Amino acid sequence: MKTTLLKIFLGIVAIVIICSAKSSKRDPLALYAELDKNAPVNTLTAKEKENGWQLLFDGKKTDGWHGYNMKVFPDCWKIDDGTFTTTNSGSQEGLDIVTDKVYRSFAFSIEYKMVKATNSGVIFQINEDPKYKYPYETGPEFQIIDHENWPDKLEDWQMNGANYAMYPPMAKPYKPIGEWNRLFLVVDGNFVTQMLNDVVVVKYEKNSEEWKKLRNSGKWANYPDWGKFDEGHISLQNHGTKVWFRNIKLKKL
């Protein structure tokens, strides 16, 4: 009898732990506050290191990154003056660069700069497999775009700061062309928060009824594996337009 009760108790504890992990929700603003906005570019301060932040790009080497579904770093990207930047043009989709490592729950910070009609994004929870051509076939995207100068009419879920093809931005705190923007993303279990230049622009709960409805009624209905993975690579998107990235930092949660 005691053995049976112990097994039942341990089973309940395991379920509670699993459910807690899936629905964990830490304060994104507190995580954001851990970053030193005045730190030198592409460096970590002692305090950031103490808080568990990692530097994913030192401004000099491509270590830790590769082309999607490749083993090497693609030549459609280069390092220029301490930034990752694209080298191709024409607005045609090219090779994204992705992190070597995969991540589940994390906070991610990056700065980006655009030119007129830039189109790019940060995509996460990506699965690498030859059956996929692009990272966006599996992973959600924090949209980066100069929507003010984009030649075509855009939906609200295509605007800068949106969770592409899902959630439009609640605010538009983007900076003028040529200035650096700070993108901050928190994926905490099923809870996702997107911030742009100190302002929360998107919040949602993955696998909620609202999320499922949007996922199954829009663009992603034609992509059966989109949003399927809770762990994956993070990519910087190459859409054939000029963009610069720097100050790439990540903290595992």
Image (tube, grey):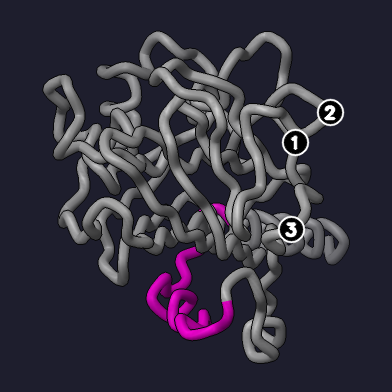
Quarter holding residue 225? top right
Judged left or right of residue 14, residue 210 is: left
For image coordinates 56% across by 31% down, the residue present is 87
Q: Position of residue 130 (x, y in %)?
A: 72, 12
For image coordinates 40% across by 9% down, the residue present is 222
**241, above or below 216, in the image:** below
**194, above or below 163, in the image:** below
Q: Is residue 232 visible?
A: no
Circle nearer the viewer, 3 or 1: 3
For image coordinates 69% across by 77% down, the residue present is 52
Q: Which residue is mark 3?
A: 60
Q: Residues within 10 Å of mark 3 (few under 14, many from 20)?
A: few
For image coordinates 84% across by 66% down, the residue present is 2
N-term mark: 2 or 3: 3
- What's the magenta bit mostly, secondary-structure-wise? loop
Q: Is residue 36 magenta?
A: yes
Query: CA separation, marks 3 and 1?
Result: 15 Å
Boundaries of the magenta span: 21-40
Judged left or right of residue 203, residue 244 is: right
**71, above or below 52, in the image:** above
Report the disc number at residue 66: 1
Q: Is residue 119 visible?
A: yes
Q: Which residue is mark 2?
A: 71
Q: Position of residue 101 (x, y in %)?
A: 76, 46
Tag 1: residue type? His
